[in-house]
Amino acid sequence: MRIGVDVGGTNTDAVAMSGNDVVGWAKATTTPEVTDGIVTAVRTLLGSHGQSPEAIGAVMIGTTHFTNALVEGRRLVPTAVVRLGLPATKGLPPFIDWPDRLRAVLGDHVYLCHGGHEFDGRLISPIDHEELRAAARDIASKGLRSVAVASVFSPVDASLEHETQEVLRDEVPGLDISLSSEIGRLGLLERENAAIVNACLRPLAERTVAGLIAALVELGLDCPLHVSQNDGTLMSADFARRYPVATFASGPTNSMRGAAFLSGVRDGVVIDVGGTTSDIGVLVNGFPREASTAVSVAGVRTNFRMPDVLSLGLGGGSLVRSDCGQSDRGQSDRVTVGPDSVGYELAEKALVFGGEELTATDVATAAGMADIGDRAATANLDPALVRDAVESIQVMLAETVEQMKTSANPVPVVVVGGGGVLVRDGLAGASETIRPEYFSVASAIGAAIAQVGAETERVYSMAEMTRDEAMERARSVTAQRAVDAGADPATVEITDVDEIPLTYLPSNAIRIRVKAIGDLASADGTPHTGTDI
């Protein structure tokens, strides 16, 4: 038996699964301290379905905690950035493209040092140990503990980043260091940004993971804890401590994986409607389509893997207003729906729950699309307002689905999430609109069925090795990274390989991206096999 948990902005969902069967589920209101909501949801789940804590072999948690911290600019720590590249790269220093509010929080502690490589592996300049030691002493004098290290073309050769890490820690033991070569892809600024984001979240990750483990102890669960990554796979608690950025967008990813499992749709569009937002993504062979370009998170451009998702300020708690004049995209001139929302206070402020705010949940209930709360509380709503609000919701969603499709042909649309009742059957652009059983807890199910995965991207010079040797090295490094993330070594498989010849480089280099997935071993040593969907 395993438990999947999804911590959303409004609700925390918990699902118990045995093999491919859903044994039970429960919801609780998300709390400011995320562990409290998790404890409530899991305790309710275990109590209502008579599950013994001893029967639980693993707990998988997906959370937006780290994404929210960056978006809000809270719970981040001042971070030093050591870039290896002098005499190059001075024109575009670290933090050059960051929002001012985040630069102020992190402190603009920048150290440009010698080092880095050319695209073909040649040194730009050797690193200067005394220069690095001086930087480490200055970092310590400022009381900083988190450091991001980025070297020019480190995906080609990461040795200088590792050497720098050793020098810094030798001078100042205990520094918490994130290496860009372990986090981002090609592209110095985006990769460096990803490392900085990871570094400033590391202390929060330590506290959060410790809190999650304490929550399991409080619940009497003696089993491994795994955290959802943003590619639909899992990582161990220790791996999550080191790489909190890997959790970004894991909520929508889990929803899409859960949608694929529940509906059997491997290629289509998923609409995940929550209490505050709707996330629309695309399934390709049962997994979320990855974004092909740099992704901006809280105004920071990064290039680590992220699902290709569009978010709308539309959810069950979205406020509905009438006679608002000129409308936003796709909405009726008579009403607007969102983007502001009552969020986790839906159960207190919506009309159907005795509140005084008109929300999307209220109009869906009034229109007969849902049976939530006290429907009589919506009896006095203007039928024209209800009709226009419902139509506005459908237009907003249909337009976003069209943006995500790669052709004009209708595609299957799977609707999940607690606010899924807002979507009518027959959505424009959909060949069919599917709302599967357990759709309201699809994200928690996506976490529960996940396997462990890892990805690497490197550039290899054919002047130093053959193509086969480069491919074997890339596969080996990725497989080991999957094991480090918590996969059973005996089950690790290479699932995706992209090879791009860089013909414009004189060294006849190739860029190789490899993805590996393996089964999660249960507490008794037998693999938990991922679901074949």
Image (cartoon, helix red, strand yellow):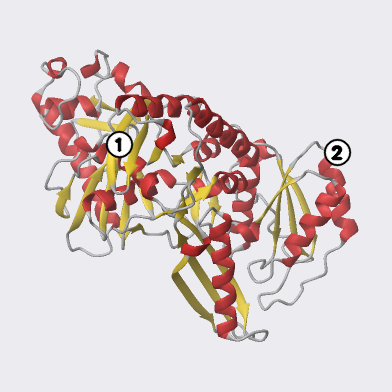
At label 2, counting other C-alpha atoms closer than 10 Å, the crowd grade (few under 14, some 14-19, many 20 or more) is few
Q: Is label 2 or label 1 in front? A: 2
Image coordinates of residue 7 in percent, x first then y, are: 42, 35
| Distance CA(mark 2)–CA(mark 1) | 47 Å
* Image quarter of residue 342: top left
Mark 2, residue position? 141
Image coordinates of residue 353 in percent, x first then y, are: 24, 16
Image coordinates of residue 205 in percent, x first then y, are: 59, 39
In which quadrant will I find the N terminus?
top left
**Residue 320 seen in this snapshot:** yes
Horizontal side of 525 relative to 123 (left or right) equals left
Q: Is 161 above or below relative to 343? A: below
At label 1, counting other C-alpha atoms closer than 10 Å, the crowd grade (few under 14, some 14-19, many 20 or more) is many
In which quadrant will I find the C terminus?
bottom left
Residue drawn at point x = 23 percent, y = 29 percent: 360
Amino acid type, callout 1: Leu
N-term-proximal mark, 2 vs 1: 2
Q: Secondary structure at mark 1?
A: loop
Horizontal side of 241 relative to 108 (left or right) equals left
Residue that protrudes farthest toward the right in the picture:
130
Q: Is 23 above or below relative to 135? A: above
Residue drawn at point x = 42 percent, y = 59 percent: 291
Image coordinates of residue 528 in percent, x first then y, are: 41, 52
Amino acid type, callout 2: Ser
**Residue 252 seen in this snapshot:** no
Q: How many marks?
A: 2
* Image quarter of residue 84: bottom right
Mark 1, residue position? 314
Residue 30 — which label?
none
